[in-house]
Image (cartoon, rainbow, N blue to C red):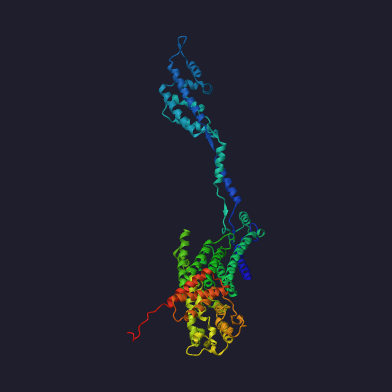
Amino acid sequence: MIPSVVLLGIFFFFITLDNVNTKTYDITRFSTAKETIRSPITIEDEKETERKTRETVQSVSDRYLVSDEVTKERISFAEEIREAIHTLHEEGKEVTDNKPMTGQEKVQKLNQLLSEDISVSVKDQTFLQLIEASKEDREKGFTLLIQALRETLNDGVRTENLQTAIANVQDKIKYSTLNDNIKKPLTELTKFLVVENSFFDVEQTMEARKEAAGSVDPVMIRAGEVIVREGQTITNQIYENLELVGVLDSQRNIFPLLGMLLLIVLISLVIGFEMYRMNKDNNLDNNKIITIVIVTVIGIALMKIVSLYTEEYNEIFYIVPIATSALLLKLLINERMAFVMAIIYAILAGFIFNGKITGYLNAEAGLYILISQVAGLYFLMNVKDRTAILKSGLGIMVVNTMTVLLFIFLSFEKYSIQDLFIQLGFAMFAAFLSAVLTIGLLPFFEAGLNMLSDVKLLQLSNPNQPLLKKLLTEAPGTYHHSVMVANLSETACEAIGANGLLARVGAYYHDIGKTVKPHYFVENQLSIQNPHDFISPKQSAEIIIRHPYDGANYLKKYKMPKEIIDIALQHHGTSLLKYFYFKEKEKNNHVKELDFRYPGPKPQTKEAAIINICDSVEAAVRSLKEPTEEKIEDIITSIIHDRMSDGQLDESPLTLKELKIIQQTLFDTLKGIFHSRIQYPKEEEK
């Protein structure tokens, strides 16, 4: 068992080696690429990301803060000048020595009314022109000036655009409908009122640059992305990318190999555990181990061969007939092992179909492989002949088609009708090929390794089989007894979840050894005197005890499956021939009980143990002259208790709960067979 698991592990490792082993190249800068090289991994190009970030940050303009205080201050200066001139005119004509105030005196008076910042900065000539303008022109002029000043300052005036801002205000004055006598002083006043009010904001600028840097997505080189195409010159940038993804000769990476090795160890442990579980239940032998290995190698090899022809955007893995492996394992081993191996095949398929891109797992291929196998296991039910495999193939075909359509719809890509039909054709052909390969390979395992499948069991149950014909013609009573035991055994096995078909076929052949001396068995003694009356009990016991081993020899001669041979050998276990033992004991008190016991072995499987019970139950119930439900129930209970107390069931995996179910099942079955019939009156009674 362990060597086979190790062998499979080694096979898995080497079959997936080139799918996880990073291929390296001997490349120099500015040479020509001899082949197309793809990235084996997904990795960030930190240098390119840094460059992109730097450019993005540099593109962020400086942030400025517009001072509302400065804006209000300059507007208030304009309003102050207007109000001061208005106050000056409201006071009327001031007189000095009975003479009106001169223009200079008015300017001096105005300077006294105004703030020092204004009076110092504005020329007297400008004030004089404003004072001498008409009230209407002055009000219109200041209204326009304050509005233009507010708009310009609200937009923000920086040092570098101060002159532009002043010119903008002056242009609004220049191209207004104001009189020329008011335009000139207002234009001069603009030079004082328009000042810098937008100042560099360090915090906002840094925050903006930080946000811009954070918005830059990392520059990634994706697994499978083409770094350089065949014939392309290896530039410095391309060389750095090749170095980054680790495909240069000096950069061989063993970590993917270690990862794959860990996965294979886990897979091998799962397979080993399942084999151990089968061995614990006496359901594992060398032929089954060889079958698991061969079927697995065939399935994985098929996937590997198809993967060699897989190219980019080519879903050729749809054509893999992997369901063959699942079907064969279910037919030759059991459904649990088939399901476990189906999961393992799906996991390995994800690596095998990864396009030899290290670190990439083709989930679509793995899911398709798993669904296809599970469909095969689900639809392979009630195997009566090989056509059941073809029916299973039809089910796989439907599921494969639906799975392909599912992938196409989920991909959100546009497919041509031609591509659609090609992919669906692959999926349907894989299902058909799976069924054909299963039917074709099954006989090789059945004949070459003497494996037992349901199909083989159905063939062996055919009454035209040479041994069954021999039993029918040479020991008809035993044949009828075997058919009854088969019916009882199959019903009991199905009640506890054992293999009912195996029990039925095993029961057909379990007494084939009686054909050596058929008349020494009571069921074949029709209209003849019992030959045991003429020989000693010990001789009778020797003849009776020989029949399981004579039967095993017959079965081996006809190359019957091991399971059938084991049932023939074990169906009496080491039980005691009580009738002849006690008969001999009447004459000889020193008789040895061992001489009247079957040599064994005891039943090792549930099917053999059930046949052991049903063999005795059928014979005992058949011997009843007037069977009633009470008598039948007592016989069944007595035989099961006798088998347990005699230790005949110690080596079988039957539980007490299962024995209880078997007891009730046998009672219900026999009660139906030996039900009470109406006693029709005779002619005289009429």
Residue 467: % across, % down: 52, 84
Residue 556 in view in this figure = no
| Residue 627 in view | yes
- The residue nearer to you, when weighing 36 against 565, is 565
Classify the position of the C terminus by image quarter.
bottom left
Q: Residue furthest left?
A: 686
575 lies above or below 113: below
Pick the front one: 373 or 105: 373
Q: Is residue 453 above or below residue 239?
A: below
Residue farthest along the top direction in this orientation? 97
Q: Position of residue 91 (x, y in %)?
A: 44, 15
Instruction: Classify residue 15 by image quadrant.
Output: bottom right
From this view, report whether residue 654 is shown above or below residue 174. below
Q: Residue furthest right?
A: 250
Q: Position of residue 349 (x, y in %)?
A: 55, 65
Which residue is at a point 47% across and 22% down the rendered structure image?
81
Is 173 placed above or below 416 here?
above
